[in-house]
Amino acid sequence: MKLADIRRPENIVSCKPRLMNDKNMHYCPGCSHGVVHKIISEVIEDLGMEDIAIGIAPVGCAVFAYNYIDIDWIEAAHGRAPAVATAAKRLNPDKMVFTYQGDGDMAAIGTSETLHAANRGENIAMIFINNGIYGMTGGQMAPTTLEGMKTSTTPYGRRVDLNGHPLNITALMAQLPGTCYVTRQSVHTPAAVRKAKSAIAKAFKNSMEGRGTSLVEIVSTCSSGWKMSPDASNKWMEQNMFPAYPPGDIKDVTLNEEK
């Protein structure tokens, strides 16, 4: 088949979203961030939200999203993305506002902002990348680090008696009356990517329909922090992360409305 034929619209299976620019991504091999960036871009394009989308990126690996997705972005201080998103949405109710946060941001320094924004039912979407470790700053223990999991600050594994229990913030968020949609997904297989994309699309629609706060957790890998190859990281995630953070919808008020 000639190159011209390959590029014919009917022969294209997948292509780079228009909203993703040509900058080379800096993420480590096997990192989930790049895949999530792609599906966020696709969802915004599919829903025709290019001109109304505002992303809020805080500190951590998540902060670099503005480098790769060509929409309006606001950089927030560490943990303050939900507070900034609250202001952006209230001042611009016709905009689709979402946060893009890691576990250190959402489940540690930003726990207060996250829970209170969700409890108020702010009409925003939150994308939560959970790899159970502080990937940017040296592989330290995060609130979501599993019991027994080794990190640079828990070299013999996380101990509940010393370090406390892993924080399942997504389950906590589902209990709040202000949340309308809480789900946990992953992007380690093509099927998982399709489910994650559908979940993000629903969260973004909820924001525009005034349903309240949506949270999409993406259980992810950190090959560098975990000291594993990308393939081994995916297998480790399935065997260890999924039992603690099982993928699937936790709360969806739209299902009750449709009955």
Image (cartoon, rainbow, N blue to C red):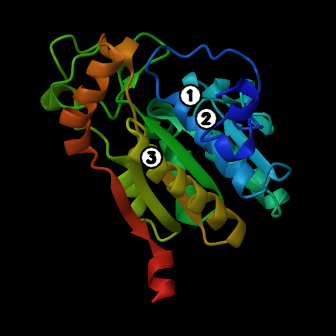
| Crowd tier of the residue under label 2, counting other residues whose Cα lies within 10 Å: few below 14, some 14–19, many 20 or above | some
Specify the amino acid type for callout 2.
Answer: His
| Numbered badge on residue 34 | 1
Q: Could you tell me residue 248's position as x and y percent? A: 34, 57
Specify the amino acid type for callout 3.
Answer: Glu
| Numbered badge on residue 237 | none
| Crowd tier of the residue under label 3, counting other residues whose Cα lies within 10 Å: few below 14, some 14–19, many 20 or above | many
Q: Circle 2 is placed at which residue position?
A: 37
| Crowd tier of the residue under label 1, counting other residues whose Cα lies within 10 Å: few below 14, some 14–19, many 20 or above | some
Q: Nearer the viewer, mark 1 or mark 3?
A: 1
Q: Are marks 1 and 2 in contact (CB under 8 Å)?
A: yes
Q: Could you tell me residue 46's position as x and y percent? A: 70, 54
Indicate whether 183 appears above or below 221: below
Badge 2 marks a residue whose secondary structure is: helix
Q: Earlier in the sequence, mark 3 or mark 2?
A: 2
Q: Earlier in the sequence, mark 1 or mark 3?
A: 1
Alpha-carbon span between mark 3 and mark 2: 14 Å
State which quadrant residue 147 falls in.
Answer: top left
Q: Circle 3 is placed at which residue position?
A: 217
